[in-house]
Image: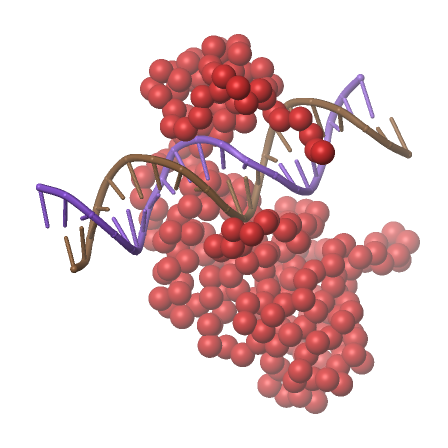
Chain colours: A red, B purple, C brown
Amino acid sequence: MGRSPCCEKAHINKGAWTKEEDDRLVAYIRAHGEGCWRSVPQAAGLLRCGKSCRLRWINYLRPGLKRGNFTEQEDELIIKLHSHLGNKWSLIAGRLPGRTDNEIKNYWNTHIRRKLLSRGIDPATHRSIHAPTSDFTISFAKREEMDGRVFSCEREKIMSSSSCCSSNSSNSSREGSGQINKYNFPDLNLDLSLCLGTPSQKQQQQVDVQSMQVGKGSCFSCGWGLEMKIEECKCVAFPELKSGFLDHRSIEMK
DNA sequence: AATTGATGCAACCGCCCCGCA
DNA sequence: ATGCGGGGCGGTTGCATCAAT
């Protein structure tokens, strides 16, 4: 089943690129510009897959790439962006001139993750490892301003109490890559899965979301009229909680 | 000096999105 | 409206290098 491969696997070089291959690719793109990657290998005289050419160009050969060590400022910016965007490496890279998504992804997995863990912060949620969490399942809906129709954007997953939140704790699991959260919000393309901390006052009807240090879903900044419906509550601490709506400011518990 | 485990990073894989016919 | 194909992306793998013993 499935699609045909992007190129013939036979007669294709794999592995590290040689200087000669780099030179050929650079020369070709300088002469013809970036275009149909599928045709690049043949046109450039390379025994490579088009995808491989694209990757090599984008990650290593493209002009303007920084390379080298990340600065402390870049570190902090990556952490901050990741807390908003999750593993959207291309979006994060877009805010770090001269850095590529692949480079940032690798740097995150090898350095920043460890750095955050040493600070006692869960890299997936950006919350204290020791902070209590609860099991909410929330889905989100975007209000259609024009006709008042509310439609669901995306269902999200049931979050376990130990590793809730975030775009699919990818960390080291080598077992299939289930894409869970895909949103089409403008600009930030935020992953809106929320991990709600235990409210300090059980009886409160209005919960200030910002004061709850919601790990994800910086919906406050997206500017869109969002409505987030608590569809299925699995919270042990608040069994009476049935359903409600979360707008930019509050959760209304009914 | 040799061996072994840990780490870092370049590159590949496979899925998804979107434009186009 | 639908199917196809290219491009893009996140996740994973493999290998080179480093550090510890």
Residue at 42% of width from left, 14% of height from top? A24
- Near-viewer residue (A194 or A227): A194
- Near-viewer residue (A65 or A124): A124
Query: Horizontally, is A43 left or right of A218 in the view?
Result: left
Corner quadrant of residue C21: bottom left
Residue at 74% of width from left, 55% of height from top? A154
| Residue A225 at least partly seen | no
- Near-viewer residue (A162 or A144): A162
- Near-viewer residue (A228 or C4): C4
Q: Quadrant of the C terminus of chain A?
A: bottom right
Where is residue A84 drawn, in percent x and y?
Answer: 56, 57
| Residue A138 at least partly seen | yes
Where is residue A180 drawn, in percent x and y?
Answer: 66, 53
Residue at 47% of width from left, 61% of height from top? A123
Where is residue C8 drawn, in percent x and y?
Answer: 59, 34
Where is residue A152 drawn, in percent x and y?
Answer: 80, 57
- In the displayed structure, A88 sits above or below A225; it is above
- In the displayed structure, A254 sits above or below C17; it is below
Q: Quadrant of the N terminus of chain A?
A: top right
Residue at 36% of width from left, 15% of height from top? A20
Give the mark count. 0
Query: Horizontally, is A101 left or right of A23 in the view?
Result: right
Corner quadrant of residue A213: bottom right
- In the displayed structure, A195 sits above or below A199; it is above
Query: Horizontally, is C16 left or right of A66 in the view?
Result: left
Corner quadrant of residue A220: bottom right
